Image (cartoon, rainbow, N blue to C red):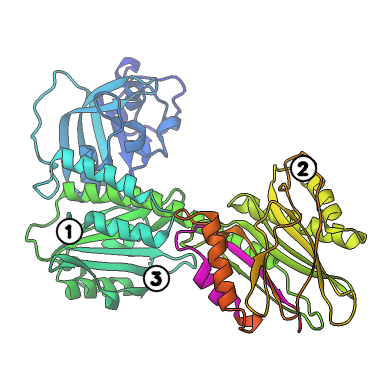
Amino acid sequence: MRVPEDARGSWPGQRQRPRHWWDLCDAGVYLVDEQGRIVEVNARAEHLLRRSADALVGCDAHDLLHRGKNGESVPRSRCVMREPLVTGGTAQGEREWLVRGDGSLLRVSWIVTTCRLEDGGRGALILFHEAGPVMRVEEGRWSAGGSMSEHDRLALLAETTTTLTSSLDVDETLRHLVRLVVPLLGDWAVIDLLTEEGGVSRAVVVCHADGALRHREDLEGPMPPVPQGSSMPLSRALRGVTAALAGPENYQGPPDAEIAVVQRKLFEATGMHSASIAPIRGVREVIGALTLGRSSRPEPFTAADLLLVEDIARRAGLALDNARLYERQRRVAETMQRHLLPQLPRVSGVEMAACYLPAPHASQVGGDWYDAFVLSEDVVGLVIGDVVGHDLDAAAGMAQVCNMLRAYAGEVEEPPSAIVGRLDQAVTRMAEDTMATVVFARLERPEAGRFRLRWTNAGHPPPLLVEAGGRARFLEEGSGLLLGTGLRPDRADAVLELPPRSTVVMYTDGLIESHRHSLDEGMDRLSRQATVLADRPLGSLCEPLLARVRPEDNDDDVAMLLLRVPG
């Protein structure tokens, strides 16, 4: 049977492909897989949508086509055309909108029914045509839980996006997610995460009981692997296939994998009679699965609830993906930074100790560093510095500045001010704009039993000298501009004969800066606590000094270098 061209429709660029029965339809037809991706379209769909098959196949049908009547994006939780794909069955309607390739909107009458694809997987077949006058559609069928209004649902999704994107810490993001959905949508929240090693971890199990959220740590922990062939709802969600409604009955039969046994025990232990299970997808891969369960409230989850949970899980996936990426980048920078920090040299008669503490709460990595190196038999170079910034660039800049300073200091014997002046010029020639503060000092031993400190300071907090008798003062002499300004300022040296058994504390600003207190208050606190701790062995001084001096609200990293001369 030959179908006339005007009946089949055409669109520039449409590809030639085998004929199917849907090519005989006067309606547009497209076929989607379990994840909602278009796998086939007919010629009439290309014509109505003004898009070629090549521009449609492989795309997410909801993201690409579905719009509101004003052209706005439609949350997945409100997409009535997705219901059969999620829950099975058939649905139809009269007033949905699809966006064409030229940006115009097409109002369609439609019918969606589930089907089997050629590869044996489940999908859905969508038939649509341009709608005539708008016909009445049943109202209220998508109200979540039978009680949540459209306004409340949209408000929850907006709050989910705002709350989950406010943190770059994975654990904090999970806590936010639980508080958003329990007890509002369910009595239980279970979050399973895929690990970087390829395993599965039940990261969170929380229930609402007696008016409070309670963790069930006995149900958390490592999970069995997810087999590719498992058809159970959790396994499918962890593979990123689709969201599903589930209950104890789904896990009563013979289990198809060990993870199904664990899931059956979860239903038994929690008393959940109904659950919504949705994949948590990141930008490039599946991150895990979110399960919301009901045990005390009698009504089961509905298809509308499942669409809402799926939308929440999708937003959680993007937030968790960002948090994981941030933490991965932070670990790389921190590892690089730690490896770049040196082993302290052994110098006869001189005690030295150092420590580096990264920023708290997985915040940011800075460019703080310390260094100590032998320049000659009686001279040791000492450095404390901070490259401006809190990222991999700052850590990389720190490595360059540190290495250049070492090279200049060991090249010729010059005063610290001359060496730092040369370093300043080199910093201005770096490919990336870099600014840094630094104290460079030479610990000199002019004769046996005597030690002299000679230093220059380029915009850095001044070192602290603590004498054996408890007297303390900051070494503010020799101060000048920070590195990288391009101004080439004159720099000065300062010299001090170190008293016997005196301690010099060199530190970065993370030790004393606070959002609530002035810098002077932080320096006073350091002076007091260093005086109190002056009698302790130098090797055990760093930890208590950090604990007593570093402000709780400081989100910066800290480096410290301590030295003590003999008495």
Residue type for callout 3: Pro
Name the residue beneath numbered marker 2.
Answer: 428
The percent coordinates of residue 196 (x first, y second) are 48, 64
Mark 1 surroundings: few (<14), some (14-19) or many (≥20) residues within 10 A: some
The percent coordinates of residue 251 (x first, y second) are 21, 69
The percent coordinates of residue 330 (x first, y second) are 55, 58
Q: Secondary structure at mark 3?
A: loop
The residue under the point 14% across, 18% down is 133
- Labelled pair 3, 2 in contact (Cβ < 8 Å): no
Residue type for callout 1: Pro
Residue 113 in view here: no
Name the residue beneath numbered marker 3.
Answer: 225
In this orientation, which residue lies closer to the viewer: 196 or 217? 217
Q: Residue 299 falls in which quadrant of the image?
A: bottom left
Residue 466 is one of the magenta-drawn residues: no
**Mark whose residue sits in front, 2 or 1:** 2
Considering every residue shown, the one lying at the far top of the view is 6
The percent coordinates of residue 318 (x first, y second) are 40, 49
Residue 542 is one of the magenta-drawn residues: yes
Q: Secondary structure at mark 1?
A: loop
Label number found at residue 183 = 1
Q: Is residue 545 above or below residue 392?
A: below
* Distance of label 2 from label 1 (alpha carbons): 57 Å
Left or right of 338 on screen, residue 557? left
The image quadrant where one finds the N terminus is top left
The image quadrant where one finds the C terminus is bottom right
Residue 22 in view here: yes
Q: Which residues are magenta?
A: 541-564
Mark 2 surroundings: few (<14), some (14-19) or many (≥20) residues within 10 A: some
The residue under the point 19% across, 71% down is 267
Residue type for callout 2: Thr
Q: Secondary structure at mark 2?
A: helix
